[in-house]
Each structure stands twice: as structure tokens, then as C-alpha cells.
Amino acid sequence: MSLELRLPVTSAAVPEVRRLLRRHGIDVMLCVTELLTNVVDHVGEGTDVTVRVLGMPDGRTRVEVSDPDPQALPVVRRASLADESGRGLAVLDALALRWGVVRAAGHKTVWCEVDGEGEAGEASRPPGGGGLPGLPLPVTPSRSPSP
């Protein structure tokens, strides 16, 4: 399984890309959403990006989003409950088995790897995952909040 998309990313394009990735599972959809939103917020609306979703031999799925600004590096923030933004990389960090940034001349690629797809196209994670500090609900919609 592999997919590559090239597009000028806008706020309106993010849900469209998410729909295109539906068959790759919820974790892939969420990771791509967060990475594209970071490009819009920190590099600029209309920035040309390349999105890659790659099936790995070990069963993991690798997500890559490349943009033309090697200087705008992602930074995990600790958002408060009152903050309206700033949780994107915390979401990515919670979903991904690992993630990182590769800088090159004229561009960077932010990548992450998630477990392979499980039943109904949802990525499988060990039990007990979900919910993030500062978010009132679990990340995975199929799980109910812990008491």
C-alpha cells in the first residue's frame, strides 16, 4: 500500500485529503491532518506539499509530509485546557510509534510511523492508549473515557 499526493495545502484542502485517506485508518488520517494543519499554520496557506503514505514491510504505516521550508521545525507544546490550538504535535506524539524530521536543501519532511491497520480500517494500538493531557476526550473515538 502506498499513496503520494502533491497539492497546495489550504485549510479547505485538509478535510478533502483526510477523506482520501479513509481506507488507511484513523491514525493515518489524524496524523496527516495534524501535519497538514501545521504547514498551514506555520509555513503558510497555499504552500505546496507532498503527502506520502507507505506500507512498511514490518506492518507499520509511514506517513510523510514534505514542505519547502526547512527552517520551520515542529515543536511539541504543552497546551492548557483554555488554549484553542497547540495540540497537533502532542496528538501526533500520542498516535505515532515514532516520528521525526528530515531536513534537506530547500525542504523538510516530517514523518511518523503508526501500527498497521486493524479491523474496520482502524490502526491497532496497545490497550490503554487514547486520551491526551489537556484533551477532555480520548483520541480514539471507539474508546470510552476512563473514570
Image (cartoon, helix red, strand yellow):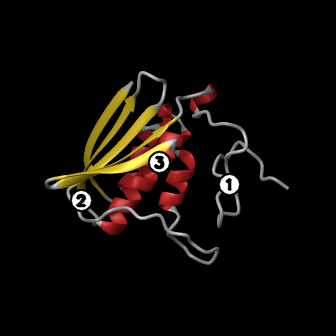
Question: Horizontal and vertical percent for residue 108?
Answer: 25, 53
> Could you say whether the residue bearing mark 3 is in a helix, strand or loop?
helix
Is there any visible trace of residue 11 in the rendered image?
no
Q: Look at mark 1 in the image and give the residue it sits on.
A: 131
Q: Amino acid at mark 1?
A: Gly
Q: Amino acid at mark 3?
A: Cys
In the current view of this chain or complex, which residue is farthest to the right? Answer: 147
* Vertical placement of residue 79 versus 33, above or below: below
In the current view of this chain or complex, which residue is farthest to the top? Answer: 57
First in sequence, mark 2 or 1: give its number.
2
Instruction: Please name whichever residue, 126 or 24, is drawn nearer the observer in this view of the structure.
Output: 126
Left or right: 59, with 39 as reference point: right
Q: CA distance from mark 3 to mark 2?
A: 18 Å
Q: Identify which residue is drawn at 25% across, 61% down.
A: 46
Is there any visible trace of residue 18 in the rendered image?
yes
> Could you say whether the residue bearing mark 1 is in a helix, strand or loop?
loop
